[in-house]
């Protein structure tokens, strides 16, 4: 059980390592102040998650719960 959990955990870590967000943050860190980067990335994440929740709720109302 523990081996499976660790395997999945490390697979997800490796898969996310090249995520575009991380690459953008590293690029911005070389040019801009850290405070601006943190606020910008945090704001973008909050906005995208809120948009996903709103759209997911709208789709959930359109799709019937029983198939």
Image (tube, rainbow, N blue to C red):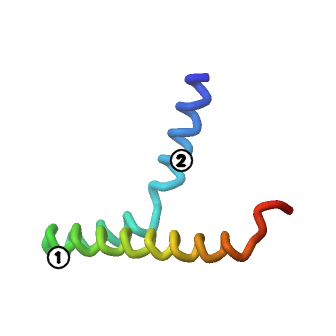
* Image quarter of residue 22: bottom left
- Mark 1 or mark 2, which is nearer the start of the sequence? 2
* Image quarter of residue 58: bottom right
Q: Relative to 29, is 58 on the left or the right?
A: right
Figure quadrant of the N terminus: top right
Which SS class for mark 1?
Answer: loop
- Rounded to the nearest angstrom, the CA distance separating label 2 from label 1 is 29 Å
Reply above or below: 63 against 15.
below
Q: Relative to 19, is 61 on the left or the right?
A: right
Q: Residue at x 75, y 71 (%)?
A: 63
Give residue 16's position: percent from left, percent from top: 49, 55
Q: Which residue is drawn at 29% across and 66% down?
A: 26
How many numbered callouts?
2
Most extreme residue toward the right is 67
Give residue 35's position: percent from left, percent from top: 14, 69
The residue nearer to you, when weighing 21 against 1, is 1
Figure quadrant of the C terminus: bottom right
Give residue 23's position: percent from left, percent from top: 38, 67
The residue nearer to you, when weighing 60 against 47, is 60
Q: Name the residue under label 2.
A: 12
Report if the CB atoms under discs 2 and 1 are less than 8 Å apart. no
Reply above or below: 6 against 25.
above
Residue 67 tag number: none
Which SS class for mark 2?
Answer: helix
Q: How crowded is mark 1: few (under 14 residues within 10 Å), some or many (20 or more)?
A: few
Q: Relative to 51, is 24 on the left or the right?
A: left
Give residue 18's position: percent from left, percent from top: 46, 60
Q: Name the residue under label 1.
A: 32
């Amino acid at each position: 059980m523990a081996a499976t959990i660790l395997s999945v955990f490390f697979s997800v870590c490796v898969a996310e390592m090249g995520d575009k967000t991380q690459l953008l943050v590293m690029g911005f860190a070389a040019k801009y102040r850290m405070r601006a980067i943190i606020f910008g990335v945090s704001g973008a994440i909050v906005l995208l998650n809120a948009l996903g929740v709103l759209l997911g709720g709208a789709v959930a109302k359109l799709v019937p719960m029983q198939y």
